[in-house]
Image: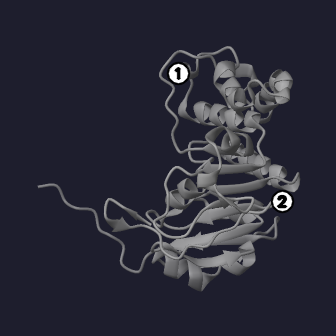
Amino acid sequence: MAIDGREVLRGVDLEVRPGELVALVGPNGAGKTTALRALADDVRPAAGAATLDGRPLAAWRAIELARRRAVLPQTAAVEFAFSVREVVQMGRAPHAGTAAERDDDRHVDAALAQADVAHLAARSYRSLSGGEQARVQLARVLAQDCGYLLLDEPTAALDLRHQETVMAIAAGLAAAGRGVLAVVHDLNLAAAYASHLALLARGTVLRFGRPADVLTDAALSDAYRTPITVSTHPTRGCPLVLAAAPADPIAPQELP
């Protein structure tokens, strides 16, 4: 897949099944967001195809896609002074005019509580901090109530407690039978919560599998081009990723 004439992805083969939380990990520029956008049908690959339940995304109507998969982008601009509850209610738009519409309030209330923003429901969305807005956007996606969720850096703007909360929500959704794909920069969060990892680097998938099989010293040092050591988390038992100091640290530049 090429963007502005530059190849971003090549030979990428990814699958997200119901019951799985797949984390896309890798260095900046590896193609993680592009891969997620292809699965969301925001960009079309020049070769190959993205499918949903075995059917090419291009064959689905937009409203059908919106009822089957929800997408959390890195940023979501809200131009008008909507309240937090109104923003979350937007997630129910695909169900307007269907039998599911009668459950709108229940889904919105549950999503507000799950994302820890129920106490902000009456506030103007634009008055919130970046982390609060990120959690409101997650609540909007949860309220959409889809079988598949595509989350682009869902923990990026969050404090430590809410990072753990969001990943626990994603893992819980997978355990309940949803298929979840998340772009995650924090390798230790990915290791703790994801059922599978896809390690992307240089536009391709270097490794795919269980966290312990993907997060190895050699694979990560190659992908990130810096020395990385992997041990075992003392309480969780999952891989614990530690970046070593570079052999030749970059010296600060003196001012003239």
Q: Position of residue 67 (x, y in %)?
A: 73, 40
Which amino acid type is shown beneath numbered disc 2? Gly
* Number of other residues with Cα within 10 Å of mark 1, as a class: few under 14, some 14 to 19, many 20 or more: some
Would residue 213 appear left or right of 123 to someone viewing this image? right
Q: Is residue 219 visible?
A: yes
* N-term-proximal mark, 2 vs 1: 2
Image height check: is 83 above or below 24?
A: above
For mark 2, give the secondary structure: loop
Residue located 49% across and 54% down the image: 43
Residue located 72% across and 72% down the image: 211
Q: Position of residue 58 (x, y in %)?
A: 58, 53
Q: Position of residue 6 (x, y in %)?
A: 34, 66
Q: Is residue 115 visible?
A: no
Report the quarter where the N terminus lies: bottom left
Which amino acid type is shown beneath numbered disc 1? Arg
Image height check: is 128 above or below 40?
A: above
The residue indicated by pointer 2 is: 19
Asked if the residues shown at circle 2 and circle 1 are in contact, with their CB atoms under 8 angstroms apart, the answer is: no
The Cα atoms of the two marked residues, 2 and 1, are separated by: 35 Å
Residue located 49% across and 67% down the image: 27
Image height check: is 193 above or below 131?
A: below
The residue indicated by pointer 1 is: 126
| Residue situated furthest left in the rendering | 256
* Number of other residues with Cα within 10 Å of mark 2, as a class: few under 14, some 14 to 19, many 20 or more: some
